[in-house]
Image (spheres, grey):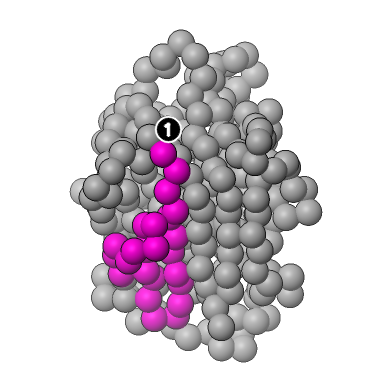
């Protein structure tokens, strides 16, 4: 994710109504819902990341590591050209990011995750208003599935850079074997997470203020490094051929 992973790791070991002020923050086009069928790269709504994240990420984002085939988008993790073309990272992978920021509503995707210790497959929203990239004031809502146990889903949220709201959900199936629908609904008073249309977790702000700033809808797949590898994801061992996470569609429905 975009946040500094060390904050998430420390987090692991009231919401405010915005009213008219929220409308002033959200770009006008972001108030409209969309369904992205991922038949091809949609440059009108998304961009493909091309940069390196923090030290807890063992990958560099490369546009070429996002593939489209028969209505499915794949994020491919490999070691081609690394570390010399990967800013010193051992691997490359893909990150697909909405150009606009989206506020209250339902974010969802149909995906089949990557299996393997050290890997993370995600769907999340993120916005860091800090002018200093080294300071996180991020507002973020997460769906993450770790490759070391693809029968579990992890929910989390961050407000002003403060997390520590992680919850592990037992899926009752192996998320790497088939496509399933994952979603969260965000409102001023709650965040609700869903799997295949069934409510699996709710946060109401009792564990800390809920996010209140609209964020970009994002998906990525990556391997942990450094502290993330040690305390959260486990160590990724490259199997000798590319690893992929698959997305059938991404959708946003604004709140009424």
Q: Main secondary structure of the magenta part?
A: strand
Rendered view: 160 above or below 196: below
Identify the residue at image location x=25%, y=53%.
Answer: 169
Element carrying mark 1:
loop
Measured as percent of width and height from the top left, residue 180 is found at: 42, 48
Is residue 91 shown to the viewer in this render?
no
Q: Is residue 238 left or right of residue 256?
A: left
**Residue projecting furthest to the top:** 240
Q: Range of the magenta residues?
A: 178-202
Where residue 247 sits, quadrant-wise, is top right
Verify whether residue 70 appears in magenta: no
Q: Is residue 170 left or right of residue 203?
A: left
Residue at 52 percent across and 62 percent down: it is 107
Q: Nearer the viewer, residue 168 or 35?
A: 35
- Seen as rendered, the residue at the extreme bottom is 20
Q: Percent position (x, y) of residue 29?
A: 74, 70
């Amino acid at each position: 994710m975009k946040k500094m992973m060390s904050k998430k790791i420390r987090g692991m070991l009231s919401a405010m109504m915005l009213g008219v002020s929220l409308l002033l923050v959200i770009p006008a086009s972001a108030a409209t819902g969309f369904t992205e069928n991922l038949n091809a790269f949609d440059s009108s709504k998304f961009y493909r990341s091309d940069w390196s994240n923090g030290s807890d990420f063992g990958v560099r984002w490369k546009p070429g590591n996002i593939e489209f085939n028969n209505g499915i988008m794949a994020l491919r993790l490999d070691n081609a050209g690394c570390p010399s073309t990967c800013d010193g990272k051992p691997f490359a992978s893909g990150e697909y990011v909405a150009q606009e920021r989206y506020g209250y509503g339902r974010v969802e995707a149909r995906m089949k995750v990557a299996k393997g210790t050290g890997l993370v497959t995600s769907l999340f929203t993120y916005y860091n208003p800090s002018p200093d990239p080294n300071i996180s004031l991020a507002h973020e809502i997460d769906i993450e599935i770790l490759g070391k146990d693809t029968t579990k889903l992890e929910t989390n949220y961050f407000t002003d850079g403060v997390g520590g709201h992680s919850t592990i959900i037992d899926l009752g199936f192996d998320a790497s074997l088939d496509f399933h629908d994952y979603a969260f609904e965000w409102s001023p008073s709650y965040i609700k997470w869903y799997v295949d249309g069934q409510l699996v977790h709710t946060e109401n702000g009792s564990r800390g203020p809920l996010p209140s700033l609209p964020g970009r809808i994002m998906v990525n797949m990556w391997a942990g490094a450094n502290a993330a590898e040690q305390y959260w994801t486990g160590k990724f061992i490259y199997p000798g051929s590319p690893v992929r996470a698959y997305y059938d569609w991404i959708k946003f429905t604004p709140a009424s």
